Image (cartoon, rainbow, N blue to C red):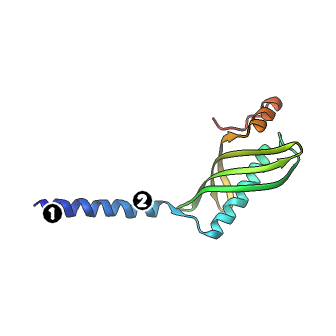
Amino acid sequence: MQTSKTLLAGALALTFALASTQAFADCDEGQETMVGKAIAAAASAKIAPVVPTQTKQMINLETCDAAGANLVSEFKFNVIGSDGLYWVTGTAKVAAGKVADMKISGLSPNLAAASAKAGVKLASN
């Protein structure tokens, strides 16, 4: 009887592990490139009212997971503006090559100050 319970518990744990890995899988290289470009474009547009002149953009995907037809990523977007480096952190959901939802969770101190001065709310919190 004890062996049956152990086997059943092991089977349930394995089933849960397989179901969990199927729900979220790491993005492949092509998906990461597409997600990075989509997020960079959306983040650039989001901060454009505060940082109108942008050069040398860089995106760092902390995570990139495929969840069904959507790709979900945590990111940090850096950009050089006319008066220095600015950055934002956040999460984004990408569908069909476009950002369907973006939440900004962090701003560089200079971007936070510039957005406050301009009266533009960038962070989602």
User: Can you give x and y, in whole percent of width and height, for residue 49 in the image?
Assistant: 83, 41
Q: Disc 2 designates what residue?
A: 20
Q: Secondary structure at mark 2?
A: helix
48, 83: nearer the viewer: 83
Q: CA distance from mark 1 to mark 2?
A: 24 Å
Q: Which mark is residue 4?
A: 1
In the rendered image, residue 66, in percent from the top left (x then y), is placed at 55, 62
Q: Are marks 1 and 2 in contact (CB under 8 Å)?
A: no
Which amino acid is tagged 2?
Ser
Name the image quarter holding residue 115.
Answer: top right
For the point 59% across and 69% down, which residue is it?
Answer: 28
Q: Residues within 10 Å of mark 1 (few under 14, many from 20)?
A: few
Quarter that holds the C terminus = top right
Q: Nearer the viewer, residue 23 or 27?
A: 27
Above or below, 89 against 63 in this view is above
At horizontal 83% and vertical 32% (from top left) the residue drawn is 118
How many numbered dots are placed on residues in this image?
2
- Which sits in the foreground, 16 or 2? 2
Q: Is residue 51 left or right of residue 73?
A: right
